[in-house]
Image (cartoon, grey):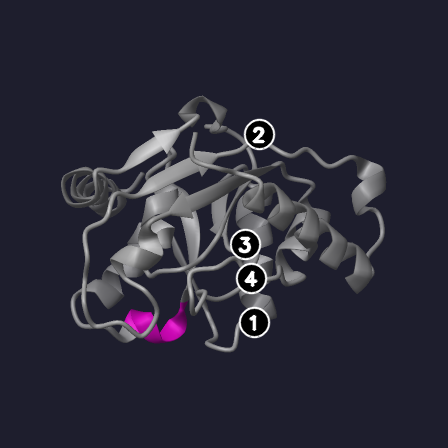
Amino acid sequence: MSLVYNIFYNLAKLLARLCFRMRVIHPERMIESGPLILAANHASFFDPPLAGICSRRGVYYLARKTLLKWPFFGPLFPAMNVIPVERDGNDMSALREVIKKIKQGNGVVLFPEGTRSKDGCLQPARAGIGLVIAKTGAPVLPMRIFGSFDAFPKNSKRLHFPQITVVLGEPIHFSPEEITSTSRETYQNLSDRVMEAISSLKIE
């Protein structure tokens, strides 16, 4: 971890515990070395750091390029392992960078739904994460975040402080036969399998 990442990592963990009484179910399932895709549902701006602090190592994130223009925080995002992506999400250069980081043995947080849910409910998966799986062969750790929508939903200007719980699923390992095809149908099927794993996670 860089110094900047380490500072914000520990700050995020502290705030998550103090403000949201965050708990992590099955933390032992986290893979702490080697290539990894951390795949989570997406209902709030809080989801990237909430997913990231479940790992003890530094992981990478996708974020809109416009966020890099924020005062103070914007220039710090590259040191916080942020990979900038165009707002419409159809940014192949960003996907290539994600694939590169994973092949180098890093963990990357991705959201199969592609964008934040408007109502807190799970959305259908998009094909993007399936493409990354096919290109890297990396294991996928499904994660489901409960409570982040209630804390700070899309288009809200008010912050609430419910308890947040993150449930980690069993890692998914894909066989070479499952990822040999380069068709969009294959990518979508891989994405759907990850989304099904996320939707099956419950608070115990």
Which labelled disc corresponds to residue 91? 1
- Local SS, label 4: loop
Q: Earlier in the sequence, mark 2 or mark 3?
A: 3
- Local SS, label 3: helix
Nearest to the eye among marks 2 and 1: give it: 2
Dot 4 amino acid type:
Gln
Task: State the residue at coordinates (51%, 77%).
Answer: 88
Predominant secondary structure in magenta? helix
Look at the image and tell me whether residue 32 can be seen.
yes
Nearest to the eye among marks 4 and 2: give it: 4
Task: State the residue at coordinates (19%, 51%).
Answer: 161
Q: CA distance from mark 4 to mark 3?
A: 22 Å
Nearest to the eye among marks 4 and 1: give it: 4
Dot 3 amino acid type:
Val
Q: Which residues are magenta?
A: 64-68
Horizontally, residue 126 falls left or right of residue 204, namely right
Screen quadrant of the C terminus: top left
**Which residue is tagged 3?**
98
Q: Earlier in the sequence, mark 4 or mark 3?
A: 3
Q: CA distance from mark 2 to mark 3?
A: 22 Å
**Which residue is tagged 4?**
123
